[in-house]
Image (spheres, coloured by chain):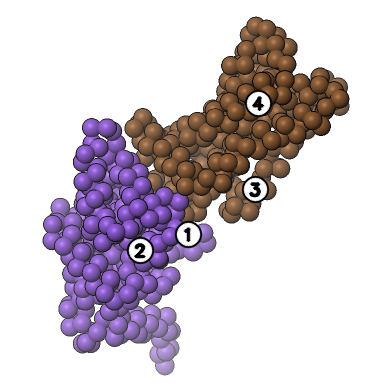
Amino acid sequence: MNAARTTATALRVLRQLRHDPRSIALLLAVPCVMLLLLRYVFDGSPRTFNSIGASLLGIFPLITMFLVTSIATLRERTSGTLERLLAMPLAKGDLIGGYALAFGAVAVVQSALATALALWGLGLDVTGAPGLLLLIALLDALLGTALGLFVSAFATSEFQAVQFMPAVIFPQLLLCGLFAPRASMQPVLEAISYAFPMSYAVDGMTQVLTHPDVTSAFFRDTAVVIACALAVLVLGAATLRRRTP
Amino acid sequence: MMNKPSDAVTARGLSVIRGPRTVLHDLHFSVPRGQITGLLGPSGCGKSTLMRAIVGTQAKVTGTLDVLGLPAGSPPLRARIGYVTQTPSVYADLTVHQNLDYFAAILTPGRRAAARRRTDVTRAITAVDLTTHADALAKNLSGGQLNRVSLAVALLGSPEILVLDEPTVGLDPVLRRDLWTLFHDIAAQGTTILVSSHAMDEAERCHRLLLLREGTLLADETPQGILTRTRTTTVEEAFLHLVDEAATEAAAETTPKEPAR
């Protein structure tokens, strides 16, 4: 791997995004609008908004980065630029690192806006430090990037790539504890929920929400999310083949 | 066949399998350095597959295939080969200049090489005559212009071998002539060019020809040599002659001999 090639790739991805102001606006505005909506949907029960709002701060970056990365890398595969890059002296890690860096930067801005709005605009009541919320949001974004990259290898068109979103994300969304506490689920489902990284992302958010200090559970949750993101990134790298049939 | 150091590409017993099909059958040939070798043949005869094998992006390649003295696909070759795919492979949502900046940064990374990259990018854009379009988004360019952006990327870093997959397809005659002049200029500086085409009239602009049909080589010699051997006046006629010849030979081999009485 080469740091200069990784940053060049990240800059290139961001430059591509800059030529697409509508996507930038959607990326940044949609989470904020959703939070605003949620706040007034639960107008009568601020406690519900509190728990769901915090979880969503972690889920939004995961979903949007999943979508953005899966489409972006699929384009790279179908446009022939991936073949060209892999015929050049570019390490697979440079490419993946570049994507992670670029979308990570977008995720930081997205999460910062959403977190700021939730905390100071909508009165989300968080016991812990806001910086920790942002940290988890960023890790979730990386996880989304990793999953998107991996999944793009199994899609042959953008149409298919979009279909992977419900297939990969919805089961995790249902089982992550957002709708019902995981402990109250049917035992088989509860067991499955332990295998999904999003569960740990939501748990981590809840830890920050309810504890003033960094707890050991928070450490465990962030460690699991990081480990999952790295594992999927490595799997994603394995799907990038220099030689194709 | 001897592996001469003067050869940029040497193939011995080269075969490629794609799915259930053997696309290239036991090819033996060499591409001399500093010359333009034309890879000609009808659509679907395996030209692109052969080029991908040489560049090192084709899977299931058997036999020996050496490029610049190294096995095709070796990591050190990646900076020494310029490759233009059949469909332009550039980022549609970047400008011409931004595309070249990025690929230049992959070839020669680092801040210290920044000045060298700038001149290299300017040189490549000038070479394909896109200076006036340098700041246009690639997706707003015409097909021919997009082809030339893709070609400019391959010219970056002055590669020792240029592998060009149908670079002139769909271009107007003037532009085609200009590009062939450019290819000859580049070859004159010692670069080896392997260029594919299914337009037989481009053959006479090459120093050497590889005629490919259904994954087998019909000829590997100079355009003049092919014409003399087949006693024809155009490469198209020569090609047809060679196809008929091959068909007759194949028929002779498979027809059972009459039993002796």
In terms of sequence position, does the residue under pointer 3 or pointer 4 come before the other?
4
Q: Is label 4 in a helix, a strand or a loop?
A: helix
Q: Give the farthest residue toward the top.
A: A213
Pointer 2 residue: B145
Q: Would you identify the image quadrant in which residue A116 lies?
A: top right
- Residue at mark 4 shares a chain with residue at mark 2: no
| Amino acid at dot 1 | Arg
Which residue is label 4 attached to? Answer: A117
Q: Colour of chain A?
A: brown
In the picture, one chain is purple; tell me its letter: B
Q: Relative to B102, say whether A216 is above or below.
A: above
User: Left or right: where does residue A224 sit relative to residue A245?
Assistant: right
Question: Mark 3 or mark 4, which is nearer to you?
Answer: 4
The amino acid pointed to by label 4 is Leu
Question: Distance between the Cα atoms at labels 4 and 1?
Answer: 54 Å
- Badges 3 and 4: C-beta atoms under 8 Å apart? no
For marks 2 and 1 on the same chain, the one whose residue lies earlier in the sequence: 1
Distance from Cα at disc 1 to Cα at disc 3:
29 Å
- Residue B247 marker: none
Q: Residue at x 65, y 48 (%)?
A: A162
Q: Residue B55: give x, y in percent of width and height.
A: 33, 53
Q: Are marks 2 and 1 in contact (CB under 8 Å)?
A: no
Q: Secondary structure at mark 1?
A: strand
**Residue B18, numbered circle:** 1
* Res. A230 visible in picture: yes
Question: Closer to the observer: label 1 or label 3?
Answer: 3
The chain containing the residue under callout 4 comes to A
- Give how far across and how far down residue A51 sits, in percent: 76, 21
Q: Secondary structure at mark 3?
A: helix
Q: Are marks 4 and 1 in contact (CB under 8 Å)?
A: no
